[in-house]
Structure formats: structure tokens, C-alpha cells
Amino acid sequence: MKELRRLERGELAQLRRGLAGENVYWLGRLFAVTGYGDAGTRTREALQLLASLYALKPQANDEVQGEAPEDDTGEKAPEKGVTIGFLMAQVHLEQNRRNGRLPGEVSSTEKRFLGLLDADWEGLAYHLRQAVTLLNAQEQTPDWAELADDLLALSRSTAFGNRVRKKWAQDFYGQIGKAQAAMHKAAGKADATEDDAPPSTSTTPSNTPTHNDEEGEETL
């Protein structure tokens, strides 16, 4: 990540075009500097994808470096690293809240997330670009170090890739579960408050005589 932060604007623009398949000739030099000069094809593809995603909004992560975002319950994100699944869950929950939907209802963000989970290696770049663009629009930025580890794992084998996808899914649906639990807890407190409220009393004095009018309605 240190080397990526040193890149100039023109180089970042080339990396962004790399997401569309354009060859970035100087990446070999960057890989050599970072110790990945002799890495296999899949590893180099994973690193190029990471660099291209970083180039979509390079300064955002630097501005919040070291700060873990809060989840929907107000708790800090786990220190182990913030995954794409965790961040997309925050966007999903905010989208549903803004549209008056429950946390567990399906949103367009969840559909995109499911597309990301189902993507094979060849389709991963497209779905990750969609995810990172969505996060940037909502002022959410990937944990680049965590994403680097995940992409390298995805490039190794199907078994490693499945572990990453499982972790993303657990983080995504775990946040939804927490939001639902918090909502139910708040609803329970509201019901308890209503149950504890004193019963309303009649404003009509019990010793006041009454009589019926012509239409049969009781009047004072």
C-alpha cells in the first residue's frame, strides 16, 4: 500500500483503465519493488486488480487510515480487518432505513453483494469494481490491506477462495442480524414502557347524574 500511495495522478488513471483490460506496462517494476516480481500469474493479477481498485478513489483510505467504521449498532468494526462484506452491509442497512424497509429486506446492494459472492475469478474484477464504486459513493472505503489478503487468497485455490467468500457472507449477514436484534430490542423496550404507563381515567365524575337525549345518546 505504501507504493500505491506514492503513485502520481497519471499512473492512477492508467490503473483505472487497467480494470477495463488495458495493460499497465510499469506494474512489473512496482511488483519488483514490493517483492512480488517472481510471483505467479494469478498473484500478479490479484495485485493488479487491487491497485486498479485503489486508483478509483486513492485518497479516501488515507483520510480515514487507522479508524475502524462503526456498524449499525454503533459498535466498532472488528480489529482483524474490515471486509467488503462488512462495508456493503452498512450500505445495505442505510439504504433500507432510508427507504423505510426492514434490515432483512432485500436491497439492490444485497443483490450486488450476492453477485460478488457468485463471481468466478474471471468475473471478480467487474463485481469488485461495482462494489468499490458503490462504497465510494456512500463514503465507505475498503480496508485495502484486508482486501489485498483476500484477493491473494482468492487467487491461490478454490478452497482458499471459498473461505474468503464465507467470511464476506458472514460479515454481511452478521451485521444484518445485529441490526434486526437491535430493532427488536428497541421495540421490546417501547412495549414495556407502554405496559408500565398508568391507566387513563374517565373525566366524567362518578356522582354526576345523566339523562338521555331524544336520540338516545347519554349527555350530562
Image (cartoon, grey):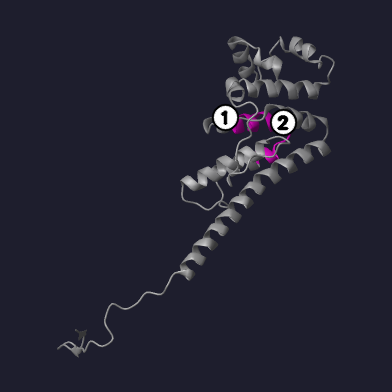
Please give the range of residues in magenta.
Answer: 115-132
State the image coordinates of residue 112 (x, y, percent, origin top left): 60, 39
Between discs 1 and 2, the one toward the N terminus:
1
Name the residue rendered at 78%, 11% in the picture. Answer: 33
**Foreground residue among 118 and 164:** 164
Q: Secondary structure at mark 2?
A: helix
Q: Quadrant of residue 19?
A: top right
Amino acid type of the residue tagged 2 in the rendering: Glu
The residue that mark 1 highlights is 133
Amino acid type of the residue tagged 1 in the rendering: Thr
The mark found on residue 41 in the picture is none
Mark 2 and mark 1 in contact (Cβ < 8 Å)? no
Q: Is residue 183 left or right of residue 22?
A: left
**Foreground residue among 58 and 198:** 198
Q: CA distance from mark 1 to mark 2?
A: 17 Å
Name the residue rendered at 62%, 37% in the picture. Answer: 87
State the image coordinates of residue 72 (x, y, percent, origin top left): 58, 45
The residue that mark 2 highlights is 146
In magenta segment, residue 47: no
Q: Quadrant of residue 108?
A: top right
Which part of the image, by quadrant, shows the C terminus? Answer: bottom left
Name the residue rendered at 61%, 36% in the picture. Answer: 69
Q: Residues within 10 Å of mark 2 (few under 14, many from 20)?
A: some
Above or below: residue 173 compared with residue 212: above
- Main secondary structure of the magenta stretch: helix
Give the number of the mark in front: 1 or 2. Answer: 2
In magenta segment, residue 126: yes
